[in-house]
Image (cartoon, helix red, strand yellow):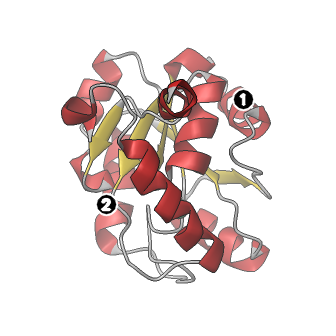
Amino acid sequence: MNILYKIGESVAPNLYVHSVCDIDFVKLKEEGIEGIVLDLDNTILPWKEYDVPPSSLEWVNKGKSLGIKFFILSNTIHTKRLAHISKTLGCDYIHPAFKPQKRNYLKAAKKLNILPKNMACVGDQLFTDIKGGNKAGFYTILVDQIDQKEFKGTKISRFFEKIIKKYIKNIDLIL
Ligand SMILES: [Mg+2]
């Protein structure tokens, strides 16, 4: 059982909210956060879609107006789509991201000229978005997936997420 708690610890987010729109930039800034690494699929927009929902776009723009910098880290292999969304959101990206490796989280922080401890990441998956962010020393924020439609491999990952959530300490506080 110890190993399961260890895995739980490695994927435990610092914060859980329903959607990106519930993230309070003012509170984040009080925590010292200056930049946010964003996941795309099912965090900012539904899987495979090109158009960013107005709510996500407004949220990003609000953050920018408060001085928060954004960066996209997505494991998607569709470069054209990624480039289109990056243009819409007006922020840079690294492709492919190879999450949960921490390498590109740190690279993103460097590109934004922000220390990892002053970075946050937002994503809908524990084993990629949150695990990678934790490894990189970021403040990690889990959101609910926007839509049920997703990559087959992700569906398998969801099954293990359900199991491991039981082994995250203080689960009642964050999940
Ligand atoms: Mg995702």
Residue 161 in the figure: left or right of residue 20: right
Q: Quadrant of the C terminus?
A: top left
Dot 1, crowdedness within 10 Å: few (<14), some or many (≥20)? many
Q: Marks 1 and 2: which is nearer the front?
A: 1
Q: Label 2, on which residue? A: 58
The percent position of residue 155, horizontal first and vertical second, equals 53, 72
**Residue at x-position 58% and y-position 38%:** 131
Rendered image quadrant of residue 7: top right
Q: Cβ(mark 2) to ligand 1 < 8 Å?
A: no
The percent position of residue 116, horizontal first and vertical second, equals 61, 21
Q: What element carries label 2?
A: helix
Count of picture labels: 2
**Viewer-proximal residue, 2 or 48?**
2
**Residue at x-position 64% and y-position 27%:** 135
Dot 1 amino acid type: Leu
Mark 1 and mark 2: Cα distance apart in space:
26 Å
Dot 2 amino acid type: Glu
**Viewer-proximal residue, 54 or 121?**
121
Residue 151 visible in this rendered orientation of the protein? yes
Residue 78 in the figure: left or right of residue 42: right
Q: Is mark 1 on a helix, strand or loop?
A: helix
The percent position of residue 14, horizontal first and vertical second, equals 37, 28
Residue 23, label in figure: none
Q: Label 1, on which residue? A: 106
Residue 71 visible in this rendered orientation of the protein? no
Dot 2, crowdedness within 10 Å: few (<14), some or many (≥20)? some
